[in-house]
Structure formats: C-alpha cells, structure tokens
Amino acid sequence: MSRLEVSEIFTSFQGEGPLAGRRAIFLRLARCNLRCTWCDTKYAYEPRYVLTIDQVRKIILKYRESMMQERPLLVVTGGEPLIQKRGLRSLLESIKEMFVTQLETNGTIDVSDIIELFDYVVVSPKLASSGNPPELRKISPTYRKVLEHYSDRIFFKFVIDRLDDIYEVESIVRELNISRGKVFLMPQCRSMEEHVEKLRLVYKLALMYNYSISVRLQYVLDIR
Ligand code: SF4
C-alpha cells in the first residue's frame, strides 16, 4: 500500500508567491534533496509521520470541511515534495477536483509527469547563496519542455540573500526564456527584522529588473 512520509498538515494563509494571502491547507511532505544554509523547514528533512494515502486524504478533507469553501487552496510543499511523486499522484488523483492545487518545488526534479494534477506550480530554484553545490541545485532540464506547454500555470520565486543573486536570476530567466511577469523576488530571512531589511534590497532589484516582489507573510505576522 502506498504511503506518504509527512512532516505536517495544517491550515493557514499562503504566505508567499503569486497566491500570497489566500487561505490554504498545507501538506508538507518530508525529505529534501538539498540543504540550503538558511532553510526554515529543516524539521521536514525527516518524516514526523508515515501515513497511508487514505489517512492523508481524510485529514485534508476534514480541513476542507472546516474551511467552508467549495474548492479551497491545497498547497503541497516540503522539503521537496516531488521526491514522493508516486504517493502524491495517488493522493491527488482522488481529491484533485475538490481543490485548487499548488505545488512548491525547488525545480531539481522533473515535474512533467505530474503537472496535470496542479493548477499552479511555484518553482524556487536555489542560487549559489543557498550554499548547495551547483550540480545538486541545477534546474531539471525537463523544465524547458514543461514551460512550452504549461507556461500559464508555472511561476518562479527566487530567494534573494545578497545583491549579486540577481545576476544568477537573470541568467536562469534568459536561459529558460521565462516571462518576467512570472518571476517573484523574495527576501531571505529568518526573522521579522531581517524580512524588513532584505525587502528593501528586493524592492530595488525588482524595480530595476522588472520582476514582482513577494513578501513572506509568515514573518510579517509571525505565523506558520
Ligand atoms: S529546497 Fe527548500 S526544504 Fe530543501 S533545503 Fe532548501 S529551503 Fe529547505
């Protein structure tokens, strides 16, 4: 029987990216193939629970009931959720119609064989400032093809830690021919104070390079 290694399931507000501010159910899957120095979900490297697909479905549907929305937002995040693509597929095939689904991924794993189950895919490629070696954080070459067919549902979210991160962002945007309107710059931070400080840098870079800004509501409001 297919199982999922889960870190946590909860409801909150989507804090980042193109859907920031929306009420959402979060399914945080365990395990990640990267180790960003500033990772704020290190607790997801190891599973807290190993659950059957049916158990995960029941928990998510219970939250859906409490949200009183016909198709609430379901955010699948991690860790890197595509590590558990098989279990994720079984889960989503059975509940997809009841949710607006959003995947958050670091972009290193092929998404093409599961993308039809997501209304939104937010890719957050990791830059040199994340501390991961280049060969590990390389964007999956399959994104070139995926972007040709599904560009309407794919967004990019870059964590900006320092000024020269922008050169790497520019090179990825050009290489994959990503529309600037689909790119969000977001401050790297682990506290409310750092959020404010780095947001100023993000603002300047976004203005200069014509990208959008993403705040991180969880740091502004000190919520999960
Ligand atoms: S990709 Fe995400 S979950 Fe994985 S180490 Fe980096 S920030 Fe943490």
Image (spheres, grey):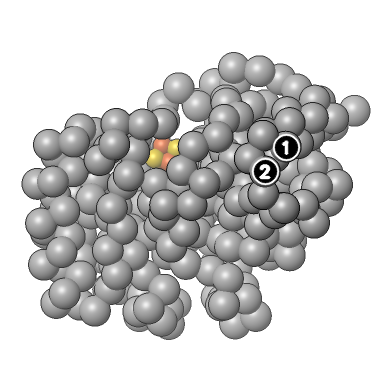
Marks 2/1 in contact by CB < 8 Å: the verdict is yes
Give whichever of 57, 190 is nearer the camera: 57
The kind of secondary structure element at disc 2 is loop
Query: Residue 56 appears at what percent x and percent y?
Result: 75, 30
Q: Which residue is mark 2?
A: 68
The kind of secondary structure element at disc 1 is helix
Give whichever of 198, 87 is nearer the camera: 198
- Residue 126 appears in the picture as rendered: yes
Q: Which residue is mark 1?
A: 65
- Extreme residue in the top direction: 48
Q: In which quadrant is the C terminus drawn?
A: top left
- In the figure, residue 157 lies in which quadrant? bottom left
Residue 82 numbered tag: none
220 shown above or below 110:
above
Q: Is residue 142 left or right of residue 14?
A: right
27 shown above or below 24:
above
Q: Is residue 37 left or right of residue 167?
A: right
3 shown above or below 99:
above
54 shown above or below 210:
above
Query: Residue 16 appears at what percent x and percent y?
Result: 38, 51
* Amino acid at the residue labelled 1: Glu
Question: Residue at point 49% right, 37% down?
Answer: 12
Q: CA distance from mark 2 to mark 1?
A: 6 Å
